[in-house]
Amino acid sequence: MNDQDLKQIKKIMHETIDETVMPLMDTVMNTVAEIKTDVAGLKSDVAGLKSDVAGLKSDVAGLKSDVAGLKSDMTELKTKVGVLQTRYPDKAYLDDRINDLRGIIVQGRKQDGARLDKLIAIQQKKKYLTDADVQELERLRTFAPLPV
């Protein structure tokens, strides 16, 4: 191989490189530039996501403290309701007591009516009341007379 052969080989190599390798290198370089741009966009997106996640963590921490406060309030409320339930009577108990009191009141009024009947009878017997007076007082009666 002589100098001339080497020059031709060099020329062929340069032509091959210029025609084949260089366009491939340009394509590779363009692709690398696009990848760099995409990676920069991804980095920006990841930074935004990190910021969003940090905000979410902060919000969740706030919610946790709110939930803890609500749990504390609910526990206090349950305690107060328990105290009220033990301290104050329920509706059924009050209904029973009211009915008992009604019975006592009615019984007392019937006894008062019986006393009044006895008083009217005594006064009529002594002639302090006329038959008209007795009838007038009978109309004012609340309950039927008790059996004697």
Image (cartoon, rainbow, N blue to C red):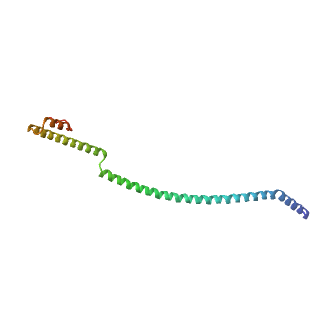
Q: Residue at x 76, y 58 (%)?
A: 30
Q: Position of residue 32 (x, y in %)?
A: 73, 59
Q: Position of residue 114 (x, y in %)?
A: 15, 39
Q: Is residue 18 visible?
A: yes
Q: Is residue 92 above or below residue 81?
A: above
Q: Residue at x 89, y 63 (%)?
A: 7
Q: Is residue 148 visible?
A: no
Quadrant into which the N terminus falls? bottom right
Please identify the residue farthest to the left as the structure is shown: 126
Q: Is residue 97 above or below residue 83?
A: above
Quadrant into which the C terminus falls? top left
**Left or right of 65 in this view: 148:** left
Quarter of the image holding residue 102?
Answer: top left
- The tally of labels here is 0
Q: Position of residue 126 (x, y in %)?
A: 8, 39
**In the foreground, 129 or 102:** 129
Q: Residue at x 46, y 57 (%)?
A: 66
Q: Position of residue 124 (x, y in %)?
A: 11, 37
Q: Is residue 43 above or below residue 105?
A: below
**Left or right of 34 in this view: 66:** left
**In the foreground, 81 or 30:** 81
